[in-house]
Image: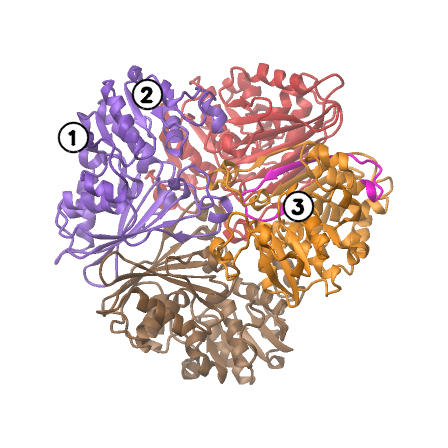
Chain colours: A orange, B red, C purple, D brown
């Protein structure tokens, strides 16, 4: 059994990793850390069966692990990654610290980077597109939740040259767990329930440059997007409605064929039959991404709809998927 | 007191009219009809205080009323409108039967029209834009819920020539009451709760031509839209995120100024301060439409966000507002 | 117009009072205070139309008001009540500070009382039972939300001697707004949504002695109850399921008759027809209390079910109702 | 691999069995039947990955299976059980047809029994209490959802003689999936959302005699209960708050000790630490039953709180657990 540590285990991504490890056949909890709850059992923080006592981050036996997941905030993660790698242990970082390859872009959207020297070692952990590099990697930058939902339908089309050069619009809707476990007036039940609200729309959300980085890396003719997140009154799930223009001569069947070819052997991407649109119900509580396409009602106009569980394929599920790849395990272990 | 009849009173729009009339200072229930529940008290159908006994539509004393609301399905409404008007009684139709001025368009998106001769008498009941004609009208076609939410932010800009000729995208999200009270697997609690799903996206939903009709009527350079509705896990409310390009030289302040000028004296349109985006919480359980604007992140790119309560400003509230106008009452009577 | 001040206006009970005053024909906002948000417009704190700028509590022009509502925490309210009364202004306290007539009981369940000298002046504001005393009062202790829902069905039966002396069980379920607007892990959307949980069950919740005080005051043979609150995944509403034994020879019809006689002329208590059980849908967004009764399945066994909106009849609605009584206004003003 | 048939696969219990089989290491779908959807893929009915084409019940290859689950309505199930058993195939019936051992009681609460001759062969499938008999059984009557939640905390106490002879009150709250997949006004999203309502309270619900049968079978001094179900605005989960009196000299620690001894080696019953109360969050999406106890505030008064996922431990999860027992598999297979 692989011994797995989780730094920052009491956020929602940590909780989800703990849940997955409980049913993983080849990996188990080594340590769980928390600044706030050190000394308490994990089951005293969340109603569950995991009775491991939380340790303070400084006391975590990092060196005894086979892999450590960083479920810590950006900024903090970069330094912790260094500690893990220095101990000769593999690391998957669920924060944003190693997602952007351009340190200036990181500074513009986040802050001064605290371990820029590690950036070149990090592999972007969108498993279906970086699997080969993840296999041999020691440091995986687990993708953002919104980018995962947007890139899985878009990248095959970009790579195949099926899109025109016009700007892509991503209208995305996320459940509340994406905002994290920290209490605030924005996540108070009475603020969210029966409500629906946009936030950080246009081009100000931190996931916009991450999506753009990958679009460009895989050959997009236009590297600029419009990205509008909204907060849904559900706990889990992201649905993205993506407006775009196809290249001349390309139609919806070409989109569907491109996806089918790309994802034929992928266990976690489900290409829906034409005529069916993705919904949260297709994916919640699974590691799946469902993708679908419809006409925008005019020649060349297409609408892609994708859905994921933001805590699974959008975070902890994909992190475990990457761990499975890093250790040569069956990629679906613990995830079905 | 005005005597008011409601044909089709046991749907959600009928229920909402009943609730408003209960606190209206100048109008009261005359009759409530229902095919299914005739003979029962209204309070036996919905938990409320209205004990009026429902009558079969054929027994409704239409001629004794000052105004009749048609909360009946399209197709049925057209013939009932004729019956009401022939009795010399004013009529507000909440169905789609008199919204589209082009009978061919109605046939294409709905069915063969059953009372085409009345079309020229009907006034489109978007109160803020057709108030003068509503005043003297006998037949008001109450707008669709999605069109109300899209047109209130768009029409002032169209009229003022602030938009480019590029296609407008309306990504709209509605609560479940918009789907009506009839039970189906689509409206089953377990189908909707914790779910979020698109439907009829692109250019197939019946409200697309209605929005386009009004855009053109008020001077749009491009009469085609992309319209993508989604179903939210809430009972009430529509939020519309609208992507568009401004005309050369126009910026967000011009949009805001245009709205402020247009709606300065309107009791039911609230122009939010710049930096604040509309949410359902701004409007649910009120007759308000909240409108707001943000940058799309590139020159000339703008995103409008509007919200309404689909059963109030999007249906029964606006119907009462129109009734108030038709009878020269204070327009806010019963609505605050 | 009465000039009304609200101390602690940015909690949920303050928000609700502001909403009611907006449509009250005879009362209007005089000042709104907040420690946290002083200097901001009320509409910057909650999405609404009330643009009054919040003042610090110390700056509130208490003496210029006709009445001040205390929406402040227990402990703080008692001292503020003194300030209001000393200024010669009437006061309705929505906290618990003046509900318990026994200062020792207050100490046991809350803390040391900070203004015990005022206790004898305070009237318990369960309007239907203390209306006469409220009329001439300067200080009304607005009842707790759970007590309101439990006492309205119970007190008529207690007073009429219809209950046996066996212990009464109140199994109560409340929406989240009852827990207040302060963010915490307990009120985080992801903690409450899709969840349902008991808390403080048995005889430890602070509302137990309040219910018992009134049962005894109105003649109960047994002054002890079992009281079990639960948290519902809704924003508003309390439903109470009350298990009790009727006195010898008393049956369900007697219960129903007693209620009908007691509440025949009450605008805000709705006795449901036999066979119909109260639900949240009967009362949410209204100032109503719905009450109903069913057999427990054995001779003398009865189950009462009542429902209220915890923020209206359970707090701010009843507070306004009491204000209306204190000033001789129509009791339903602003509440229909 | 065991070949498993599901008759009535398109209800919620069928869907849940399909989901469990997808991850079961030793059992797989043999056939899925549906009267309504025969000829369509299962994935066309529910958004999921199971593409098996539904067959009409009459065409189901019952004899080729190792076991058939009956997810069919009571009345229909009894005759189908006969067909399955006559084909020499094991059967787990999720309907009520074989739960009540007294055919007169079945007639009183359901209807005339259609296969009374099989009643004596059926084993009541509350796994933790009937495991030995289930092992060799061909026909298991899977318990009702409410009875499972009530009996797991109660039966150990009854068996150990810890309860007084006074009447037990079960105040139970269930998610909507318990009402089945059939659309109706009662299960319409807008009827349930933001609502909470009691139904069939006292002693009229069909699960009351089922609970009483088992209480008596395991030695209760009083075989009568009060049972009050309520409908929660969630999809899944049942929480039961149970009011009872302990026998003389028994205290809460005795209750806790009795449970700990009974359930020490049970994988699916979690005795919560004293001071912690069961909530839906402890169990939803698991096959667990969480049980807890608190004082009712007077000597001998106790409140038990239990929670289950009504579709898992309350239906399909327990059905699979029983299948595992019937075939000598590890009891947790497919359920963790």
* Residue D59 percent across, percent down from the top left: 62, 74
A235 magenta-colored: yes
Residue at mark 1: chain: C
| A49 or D106: nearer the viewer | A49
Which of the 4 image quadrants contains residue A107? top right
Residue lying at 50% horizontally and 18% vertically, measured from the top left: B135
* Residue A207 percent across, percent down from the top left: 69, 39
Residue lying at 16% horizontally and 47% vertically, measured from the top left: C158
Which portion, as a residue range, is magenta? A216-239
- Mark 3 Cα within 10 Å, few/some/many (few <14, many 20+)? many
Circle 1 sits on which residue? C132
* Residue D111 percent across, percent down from the top left: 38, 71
Circle 3 sits on which residue? A77
Circle 2 sits on which residue? C4
Q: Secondary structure at mark 2?
A: strand
Relative to C248, is B106 on the left or the right?
A: right
Of the two numbered discs 1 and 2 on the same chain, state the one appearing first in sequence. Answer: 2
Q: Which mark is residue C272?
A: none
- Viewer-side label of 1, 2: 2
CA gap, disc 1 and disc 2: 22 Å
* Residue B331 percent across, percent down from the top left: 45, 20
Residue at mark 3: chain: A
């Amino acid at each position: 059994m692989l011994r797995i540590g989780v730094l920052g285990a009491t956020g929602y991504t940590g909780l989800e990793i703990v849940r997955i490890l409980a049913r993983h056949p080849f990996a188990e909890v080594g340590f769980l850390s928390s600044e706030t709850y050190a000394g308490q059992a994990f089951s005293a923080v969340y109603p569950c069966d995991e009775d491991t006592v939380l340790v303070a981050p400084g006391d975590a036996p990092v060196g005894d692990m086979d892999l450590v997941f960083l479920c810590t905030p950006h900024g903090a993660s970069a330094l912790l990654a260094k500690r893990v790698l220095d101990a000769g242990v593999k690391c998957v970082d669920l924060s944003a610290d190693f997602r952007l390859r351009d340190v200036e872009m990181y500074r513009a959207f986040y802050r001064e980077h605290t371990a820029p020297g590690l950036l070149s070692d990090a592999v972007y952990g969108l498993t279906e597109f970086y699997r080969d590099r993840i296999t041999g990697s020691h440091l995986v930058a687990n993708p953002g939740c919104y980018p995962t939902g947007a890139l899985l339908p878009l990248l095959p089309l970009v790579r195949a040259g099926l899109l025109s050069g016009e700007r892509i619009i991503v209208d995305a809707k996320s459940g509340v767990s994406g905002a994290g476990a920290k209490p605030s007036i924005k996540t108070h039940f009475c603020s969210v329930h029966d409500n629906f609200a946009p936030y950080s729309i246009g081009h100000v959300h931190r996931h916009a440059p991450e999506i753009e980085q990958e679009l460009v890396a895989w050959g997009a003719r236009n590297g600029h997007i419009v990205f509008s997140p909204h907060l849904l009154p559900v706990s889990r799930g992201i649905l993205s409605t993506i407006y775009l223009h196809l290249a001349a001569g390309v139609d919806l069947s070409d989109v569907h064929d491109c996806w089918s070819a790309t994802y034929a052997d992928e266990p976690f991407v489900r290409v829906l039959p034409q005529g069916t649109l993705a919904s949260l119900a297709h994916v919640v509580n699974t590691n799946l991404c469902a993708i679908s396409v419809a006409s925008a009602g005019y020649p060349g106009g297409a609408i892609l709809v994708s859905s994921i569980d933001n805590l699974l394929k959008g975070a902890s599920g994909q992190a475990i998927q990457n761990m499975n790849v890093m250790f040569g395990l069956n990629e679906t272990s613990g995830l079905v």
